[in-house]
Image (tube, grey):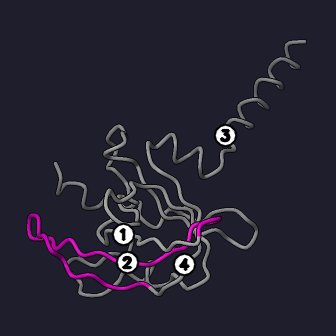
Amino acid sequence: MNKLIIALYLMSQTMYAVADGRSDCDAAAGEFLSASVVSAPKFARAKQTIKGIKLSHTHINVRPDGDSRVYDVAMSNVYARDYVRNANNIPKSLAALRTGDKLELCGKLYTSGLGIHWVHSNCNITPDAEHPDGSVKKVLADGSTGENLQSSQAYCYLWN
């Protein structure tokens, strides 16, 4: 009997661990978009420098599922795992995004215009609606998602 109870408990925990992108994003206090890339990545030069680090961005346009409108996605380059300090180009992991790629995005929708930003780590701070623990994940051929392309915490010290 005890083995059955333990087995049922372990099975229930496994079911809770299998969450989709939307529920993961809800838990991260973000807003979720499942979308297809409709434009190649574009580099945006830094408008701000903190502690000598230029905060450049990469932008893509996406079309969310079930929505004919196009959204801008602003990705902070310092959160890419392969970011090169003060580089004037797109990190390779973000440059690899192609038109037609399917993405799951978690972040903060623009308050003006159509778009989403804050699609990056929040550096282990408890997430809230203003500071979600965001992500950019490519949907793979088998329907699973790849790693978060915006999860590096190497530059979190800039905001501490």
Residue 135 % position (x, y): 46, 58
Cβ–Cβ under 8 Å for marks 3 and 2 = no
Q: Residue 50's image quarter?
A: bottom left
For residue 142, side relative to residue 127 (left or right):
right
Q: Residue at x 60, y 52 (%)?
A: 21
Q: Earlier in the sequence, mark 3 or mark 1?
A: 3
State the CA–CA distance, disc 1 to disc 4. Answer: 13 Å
In screen coordinates, is 22 left or right of 142? left
Mark drawn on residue 37: 4
Task: Pick the quarter of the image with the N terminus.
Answer: top right
- Range of residues picked out in magenta: 41-67
Q: Are marks 2 and 1 in contact (CB under 8 Å)?
A: yes
Characterize the local packing of mark 3: few (<14), some (14-19) or many (20 or more) Cα atoms within 10 angstroms. Answer: few
Label tally: 4
Q: Going by the image, does 125 lie left or right of 140?
A: left
Which residue has dot 2 on it? 59
Q: Residue furthest top?
A: 1
The disc at residue 17 is 3
Which element carries disc 1, helix, strand or loop?
strand
58 versus 159 height, above or below: below
Magenta stretch: residue 48 in it? yes
